[in-house]
């Protein structure tokens, strides 16, 4: 029920220019890291090429990077700090960073690791038959 909203995804660290990241959810791309002019929207699972690995903090305690997807270049959120209200109330404070992207390298290797045992099992059955 409410558990999914409280799960924190660790943000990607140590970015490199040219690296490929994949969006974990629908994200908007902006003309600048101020988040004022939206230039595109991308669904979850879209690969993004990092054009500038420097993270710029924008509105809402959000970390933006310059990236490209489908020929569109702009600034997209890499992470956002969760806001926490102090126990006595008052001004919210920054909590942990929640990541909106992951490295693409993990996705293909997971698929290959799962495919290899299936192929081996089929081969064993053919030899035993």
Image (cartoon, rainbow, N blue to C red):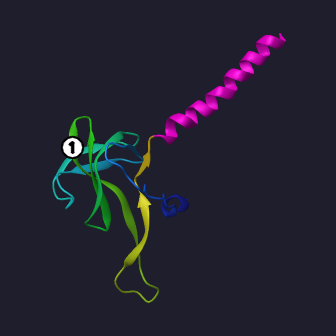
Q: Quadrant of the N terminus?
A: bottom right
Q: Is residue 121 left or right of residue 72?
A: right
Q: Is residue 49 above or below residue 93?
A: above
Observer-nearest of 105 and 47: 105
- Assess whether residue 122 is covered by the magenta stretch: yes
Q: Picture coordinates of residue 11 (x, y %)?
A: 43, 58
Name the residue: 38% across, 78% down: 93
SS of the residue at dot 1? strand
Name the residue: 31% across, 63% down: 62
Numbered label tally: 1
Badge 1 crowding class, 10 Å Cα cut-off, few under 14, some 14 to 19, many 20 or more, is: some
Q: Is residue 91 left or right of residue 87?
A: left
Q: Main secondary structure of the magenta part?
A: helix
Q: Picture coordinates of residue 100 (x, y %)?
A: 40, 53
**The residue stretch that appears in magenta:** 105-129
Observer-nearest of 1 and 83: 83
Q: Picture coordinates of residue 3 (x, y %)?
A: 55, 61
Q: Residue furthest right?
A: 128
Q: Quadrant of the C terminus?
A: top right
Name the residue: 21% across, 40% down: 72
- Assess whether residue 39 is covered by the magenta stretch: no
Q: Is residue 72 above or below residue 125?
A: below
Name the residue: 65% across, 27% down: 116
Q: Picture coordinates of residue 58 (x, y %)?
A: 25, 64
Q: Residue furthest top?
A: 129
Location of residue 12 by image quarter: bottom left
Label 1 belongs to which residue? 73
Q: Is residue 129 above or below residue 74?
A: above
């Amino acid at each position: 029920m409410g558990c999914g909203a409280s799960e924190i995804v660790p943000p990607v660290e140590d970015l490199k220019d040219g690296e490929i990241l994949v969006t974990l959810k629908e994200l908007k791309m902006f003309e600048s890291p101020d988040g004022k002019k939206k230039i595109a929207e991308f669904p979850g699972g879209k690969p993004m090429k990092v054009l500038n690995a420097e993270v710029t903090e924008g509105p809402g305690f959000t970390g933006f990077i310059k990236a490209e997807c489908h020929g569109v270049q702009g600034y997209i959120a890499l992470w956002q700090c969760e806001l926490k209200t102090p126990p006595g109330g008052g001004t919210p404070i920054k909590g942990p960073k929640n990541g909106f992207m992951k490295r693409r390298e993990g996705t293909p290797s997971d698929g290959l690791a799962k495919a290899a045992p299936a192929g081996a099992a089929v081969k064993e059955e053919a030899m035993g038959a």
